[in-house]
Amino acid sequence: MTENLNRENMIKKPEEILSILKAEALGDRCFEHILGFIRAGMSERQVAAEIERTLFALGAEALAFDTICVSGENSARPHGIPSDRIIEEGDLLTMDFGAVFEGFCGDMTRTIGIGNLSEEQKNVYDTVLNAQLAGLAACKNGVSCAAVDSAARDMIDAAGYGEYFIHTTGHGVGREVHEAPRLAKDSPDTLLADMAVTVEPGLYIPGRFGVRIEDLAIITDFGIINATKSVKELVII
């Protein structure tokens, strides 16, 4: 029943799209703040708590989902839970968060570097960024969701990291943070104007580190409106 309800609501009304854009804007403002807040020596929990405090201070009605804030080896867990692990120099830190505004969800992910990173870490980041940009470019009215997944996945496969991309490329967003359609290789769905979907490829190297970059895209007749404005080039603090 829930799946059918979600499918019936894949196409968003103009006022619903506006609410989604507003929710995502809160995430962008939160990320801008958090870049000036984070420093080595803080725990994942401390940063996650500041993300959530900031979202509510900006006007969020609720959290769209439990905030993910994971560093170092913990960032290799796509759905990792913030822990007491101390963020250290040389870590990658992944933050996945979203606000609810006017009943609709935002959803964004950014991975940043703390101090000096290795060339391998930078290469993995660049691979994910290129895959994410390819996925966004593939998002068009009338394009199959499987084709969008392939656009991102093929980029990662070509770079030799295919085994470390262990989830789908994205999902619909609305009143719930995970709705139809699914941007997956086995998805039966086609993108249509006024859908709202995430594009979020990631790479997760077990026991070492992970990278995910996620934007929220509104499908239009002329391509997409990217609701997520935050910088995607690698930020190192």
Image (tube, rainbow, N blue to C red):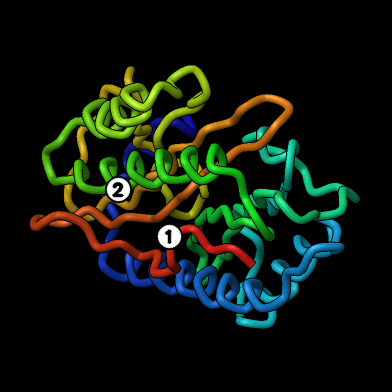
The x, y position of residue 130, in whole percent, is 33, 44
Q: Report which residue position mark 1 lands on.
A: 232
At 43% from the left edge and 50% from the top edge, which residue is drawn? Answer: 173
Q: Secondary structure at mark 2?
A: helix
Quarter of the C terminus within the rendering:
bottom right
- Residue at the extreme right of the image, as rendered: 84
Q: Is residue 195 left or right of residue 42?
A: left
Q: Quadrant of residue 44?
A: bottom right
* Dot 2 or dot 1, earlier in sequence: 2
Q: Secondary structure at mark 1?
A: loop
At 65% from the left edge and 56% from the top edge, which residue is drawn? Answer: 116
Q: In front: 223, or 196?
A: 223
At 25% from the left edge and 34% from the top edge, which residue is drawn? Answer: 148
Q: In front: 47, or 52?
A: 47
Q: Is residue 52 left or right of residue 210?
A: right
Kind of residue sitting beneath label 2:
Leu
The x, y position of residue 198, in whole percent, is 40, 47
Q: Is residue 198 above or below residue 28?
A: above
Q: CA distance from mark 2 to mark 1?
A: 10 Å
Kind of residue sitting beneath label 1:
Lys
The x, y position of residue 70, in whole percent, is 72, 47
Task: Kindly tell me whether residue 92 is visible in this rendering.
Answer: yes
Can you tell which mark lies on residue 49?
none
Number of labels in the image equals 2
The x, y position of residue 108, in whole percent, is 50, 56
Q: Report which residue position mark 2 lands on.
A: 133
Dot 2, crowdedness within 10 Å: few (<14), some or many (≥20)? some
Task: Kindly tell me whether residue 66 is visible in this rendering.
Answer: no
Do callouts 2 and 1 mark residues in contact (Cβ within 8 Å)?
Answer: no
